Structure formats: structure tokens, C-alpha cells
Amino acid sequence: MKQEKSCGAVIFREKNAQRYYLVLKSTLGHTTLCKGHVEGDETEHETAVREIREETGLAVDFVDGFREVIAYSPRPGVTKDVVFFLGRARGGDVVCQPEEVADARFLSFEEAAELLTHPSDREVLQKARAFLERG
């Protein structure tokens, strides 16, 4: 069985006492959270930082204590783990990587959850919101 690993983050920003979450519309048509494959001997955080910068142009500050893993089989003979952290966007505008990201925007929790293609992404988003609300 071949093993793959990706890392990324639930990215959020706060404005006027409201929290907004970043969702990406991929060039393949699905709506997802920011993530990508581990390259070489990168750590999980290094992969997440690189993928966030490549796909969105953003820098984030990770929120300590949040790490969620989704495990699934993308195709026969392959298992994949996707590790998600929680990151507060430092500022600046989103700049989409045109090869992979057709659109990216910050949305309310309800709007983001509704648009995400995969139930596992919605579950991670819900866990991130609950984590932030617990403070």
C-alpha cells in the first residue's frame, strides 16, 4: 500500500468582531481548504507554510494546540493522511496560484461550510471553529 501525506490549514481572519474562513475553489472544480503534498523531508508545518504561500500568497500564524488528521484512500492501493493546522492570516490580499486555485475567499463559517465539497473538510472546519470558541 502506497502512503501519501499532505498538510495545510484552516485559515481565518477576524474583522469587526466577526471571524471569516478561507475556502479555495480548485481548478478541478471542488471547493476545499488550503493543503498540499509534503515535499522531501519537510516537516508538517513547513509543508503547510509553503502550500499556503504558494496557493494563496498569504502568511499565517499558527494557533497552538490544533492538529486534525483526515485519512482516506484517494485511489486503489493508496492511503493518504491530510494534516490540518489552524492559522490566522497576517493580512494582505489573497493571490491565487493560477495552476491550482481558480478562486479563494474569506467567508462566514456558514457560507464556508456550505461550499466545501467534502464532508471531511466540513468536519475539520467545525472542529477549528469549536477550538477557537473555546479560546
Image (spheres, rainbow, N blue to C red):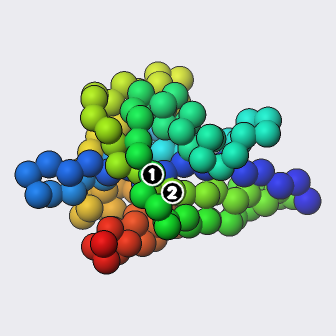
Q: Which residue is mark 1?
A: 62
Q: Residue at x 63, y 41 (%)?
A: 47
Of labels 2 and 1, the one closer to you: 1
Q: Would you say residue 81 is visible in this rendering?
A: yes
Answer with left or right where residue 69 lies relative to residue 81: left
Q: Position of residue 127 (x, y in %)?
A: 42, 72
Residue under numbered circle 2:
85
Question: In whole angstroms, how far apart are the C-alphas of marks 2 and 1?
Answer: 7 Å
How packed is label 1: few (under 14 Cα within 10 Å), some, or many (20 or more)? some
From what the image shows, is residue 71 above or below residue 87?
Answer: below
Query: What amino acid type is highlighted by mark number 2?
Result: Phe
Asked if the residue at tag 1 contacts the one at tag 2, i.e. Cβ–Cβ closer than 8 Å, the answer is yes
Quarter of the image that includes the C terminus: bottom left
Q: Position of residue 30 (x, y in %)?
A: 47, 46
User: Mark 2 or mark 1, which has the lower sequence index?
Assistant: 1
Foreground: 35 or 102?
Answer: 35
Residue 57 sits above or below residue 73 on the image: above
Q: Position of residue 1 (x, y in %)?
A: 91, 59
Nearer to me, 26 or 50: 50
State which quadrant residue 114 falls in.
Answer: bottom left
Indicate the position of residue 8 as horizontal and vertical percent values: 54, 48
Amino acid residing under circle 1: Phe
What residue is at 47 percent from the left and 25 percent from the top?
A: 97
Decide which of 21, 99 is in the foreground and name it.
Answer: 21
User: Is the residue 52 above or below the residue 10 in the image?
Assistant: above
Q: Is residue 95 left or right of residue 20?
A: right
Q: Residues within 10 Å of mark 2 (few under 14, many from 20)?
A: many
User: How many numbered marks appear?
Assistant: 2
Residue at the limit of the structure toward the top, as seen here: 98
Element under disc 2: strand
